[in-house]
Image: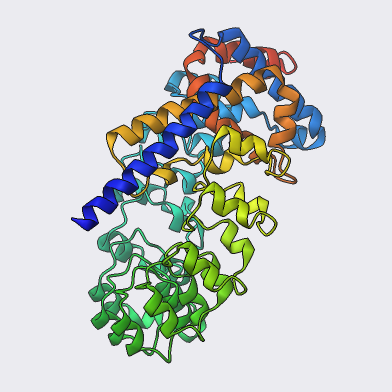
Amino acid sequence: MEENNKSLISINNSLVKIERQIAIGDKLLNFGSNKLQRNKIKNFLISISYWIKLDNYSFTNKHNYNPFISLISGFYPFSEELIMKYQHILDWYVLSSNDKIKFSPTLIEKYSDKWNFNVLGANKSIDWDIDLFDKYKDKFDWRYTIYYAEALPWSIDFVEKYIGKLNWQKFSEFKSFPWSEEFIEKYKSKFGRIDLYYNWTGLSCNRGLPWSEDFLNKYSDKWDWKYLSSNNKLPWSEDFLNKYIDKWDWNGLSRNSKLPWSEVFFNKYIDKWNWNGLSGNSGLPWSEDFFNKYIDKWDWNGLSGNSGLPWSEDFFHKYIDKWNWEYLSRNVELPWSEDFISKHKDKWNESFLNGWIRRPERILIPNFNENNIESYLKFYNKTALLALDYFIQNPKECVIRMKVVNNMQQYIIPLDDMQQHIIPFIDDSLIDEIINETITQNNPSLKG
């Protein structure tokens, strides 16, 4: 009963936070029922392209970078006809990640010299099977990138077919493979090669392994205990911890939120903990009393970003001179309200919206239910519209805020949050118009 009450309180608290945030969005947002006009979107996208080119002329010309092309390449449901029409303009790296395209073996084959296969391998809209993969196996980077291609048909049969191509160091870190004790035993000589001693480090931090005490014991002389210590998928208990007490790395343990944290447990090993690691650990039995008991030991940078603290405005103001505002700005568990934001408006990092609004799904965990999701979507839509309306009126500032030094591809990332509001206005004809106005008028040879 007590557990159920705690769960209900937790859910209610989450809903209160979300409703509070919706209220902020309602007050800030004043679009009424009017939809954003298609030509506003068009002019905004053209302006963004212009200001980015002006901001870094040499880079954009050298790499033929166009933010509008990168944007649509990533989300627009291109037909085969439109791909053919603009094949010399599209960003094929980004296009390879587009899960709105209806991929077929024919489409992949037709542009096999243009696709980035390492990106295609992560595209879950493609029905990868061993036969399709085998046709392009040499186009993948077996040394590194393929181990991020989670859409490939990873299975024991698949791995054994290409066993000679594997980079065992990177493969040992790969969580999406169906790891089993039998597989590791069968290929333990591969993992144990002297020149690849990092393999057991990769396995030690891999959360996808079938962790159990028996499994751990079987290879106890091979594990990298430093990385085991921070692996939250181990079968943590106090008995388990004590069984290997001389092997653990206490820095890693201090950061591990899945230890059986309680004040009794904490005090039992108090001379071993790393206080920097503890300060950022949301799994500790946080309360104001617990916090104050060790106030001279905490690292305030870690505390500022810690979602597990007993956040309230009183708690926040009590230590206002100690917080790191950079980390606070990204902490979704602060008592956010319009008044709270305004009261400290000169101290927040200007990208704080990207911390607690852009990733609000973190607010809901572990209390997902339909009401939470509906509230989240309502709030998220409003904040994204607010940003879009502002940037439509200030495209130059949009570019300035989006800029990331030496990485032009990052320009497009903040637009991702606004895509759902831009997408309804983009169709084949708008793409034609923008391309004709921004690209082909200066280079007629690119005209479809």
- The quarter of the rendered structure image containing the N terminus is bottom left
Q: Nearer the viewer, residue 169 or 107?
A: 169
> x%, y% of residue 202?
45, 72
Decide if residue 104 is in sight here: no
Residue depicted at 34% across the width and 68% down the height? 233
Q: Is residue 275 above or below residue 368?
A: below
Q: Residue 147: horizontal and vertical position, in percent? A: 44, 58
- Residue sitting at x 41%, y 67%: 285
Q: Based on the displayed image, in which of its 4 quarters is residue 353 positioned?
A: top right
Displayed quadrant of residue 103: top left
Occupied quadrant, residue 54: top right
Q: Is residue 128 left or right of residue 275?
A: left
* Nearer the observer, 395 or 428: 395
Q: Position of residue 207 (x, y in %)?
A: 37, 66
Most foreground residue, 372 or 139: 372
Instruction: Name the spot of residue 340 as percent of width and height, x first.
Output: 59, 39
Q: Is residue 314 visible?
A: yes
Residue 338 located left or right of residue 333: right
**Image quarter (top left, top right, bottom left or bottom right) of the C terminus:** top right
- Left or right of 323: which side holds 214? left
Residue name at image x 44 percent, y 84 percent: 269
